[in-house]
């Protein structure tokens, strides 16, 4: 059974089991601490009975700068999942789902319009996981990733910007049915 709690700075040395996954981005230490300082309720960990971190989620609250308010790419107040990962031995136990649901509760508590995330277009397991939780593809960000996870001959990989509306978006204005047909450049994403 996993224990869920907020991230603490002394957890930094315990994330390795989760970050060994080739589809998990690993960041500089200061990046993790920035999330801890700014958005502690959106940075959660799951630990096993021995205190080992077996999963975590990092998120933030944001909106586009006001200068872009009339741009078609403007993002209103929302929560963003920066990373969610579960150690290989703890997968298929519902830990990723529980971590994501906790972030969604925090997003609703902060009156956001939606939660979004970026996922590699070839990460079919993650895409299916998010779809099972009510996320849908909002747009395709062409060449978002500077490497390709499964084809070394490719220099980049597209990302899906996936979204799930929160309680504030009663009219479901911040999702679309045909998001996989709506392509944008990385420069259109803030």
Image (tube, rainbow, N blue to C red):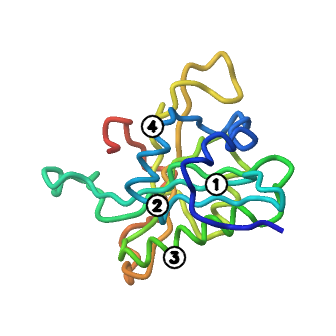
Disc on the earlier residue, 3 or 1? 1
Query: At x 39% / y 84%, what residue is drawn?
Result: 170
Give the mark toward the camera: 3 or 1: 1
Give the mark toward the camera: 4 or 1: 4
Contact (Cβ within 8 Å) of mark 3 with mark 2: no
Query: According to the image, label 3 marks what residue?
Result: 105
Q: How far apart are marks 3 and 2 (CA)?
A: 13 Å
Contact (Cβ within 8 Å) of mark 1 with mark 2: no
Query: According to the image, label 1 marks what residue?
Result: 56
Give the mark toward the camera: 3 or 2: 2
Furthest-right residue in this view: 89
Q: Which numbered tag is attached to residue 156?
A: none
Q: How far apart are marks 1 and 2 (CA)?
A: 12 Å
Secondary structure under badge 2? helix
Q: How far apart are marks 2 and 4 (CA)?
A: 14 Å
Disc on the earlier residue, 3 or 4? 4
Query: According to the image, label 2 marks what residue?
Result: 40
Note whether 93 is above or below 154 in the view shown. below
Disc on the earlier residue, 3 or 2? 2
Secondary structure under badge 1? strand
Q: Distance between the residues labelled 3 and 1?
A: 16 Å
Q: In this view, does 171 lie to the left or right of 83?
A: left
Disc on the earlier residue, 1 or 2? 2
Residue 165, given in percent of the width and then of the height, sits at 46, 72
Q: How far apart are marks 3 and 4 (CA)?
A: 26 Å
Q: In this view, does 139 lie to the left or right of 24?
A: left
Q: Dot 4 surroundings within 10 Å: few (below 14), some, or many (20 or more)?
A: few
Query: According to the image, label 4 marks what residue?
Result: 30
Note whether 182 is above or below 113 in the view shown. above
Q: Distance between the residues labelled 4 and 1?
A: 17 Å
Note whether 147 is above or below 59 in the view shown. above
């Amino acid at each position: 059974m996993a224990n869920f709690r907020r991230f603490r700075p002394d957890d930094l040395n315990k994330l390795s089991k989760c970050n060994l996954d080739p589809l998990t981005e690993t960041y500089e230490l200061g990046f993790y601490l920035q999330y801890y300082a700014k958005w502690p309720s959106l940075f959660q960990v799951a630990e096993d009975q021995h205190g080992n971190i077996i999963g975590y989620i990092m998120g933030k609250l944001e909106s586009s700068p006001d200068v872009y308010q009339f741009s078609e790419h403007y993002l209103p107040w929302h929560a963003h999942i920066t990373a969610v990962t579960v150690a290989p031995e703890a997968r298929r136990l519902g830990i990723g789902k529980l971590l994501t649901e906790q972030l969604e509760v925090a997003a609703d508590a902060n009156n956001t319009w939606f939660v979004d995330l970026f996922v590699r277009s070839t990460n079919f397991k993650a895409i299916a996981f998010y779809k099972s939780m009510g996320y849908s593809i909002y747009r395709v960000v062409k060449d978002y990733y500077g490497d390709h996870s499964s084809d070394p001959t490719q220099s980049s990989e597209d990302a899906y910007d996936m979204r799930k509306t929160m309680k504030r978006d009663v009219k479901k204005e911040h999702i679309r049915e045909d998001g996989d047909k709506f392509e944008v450049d990385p420069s259109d994403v803030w």
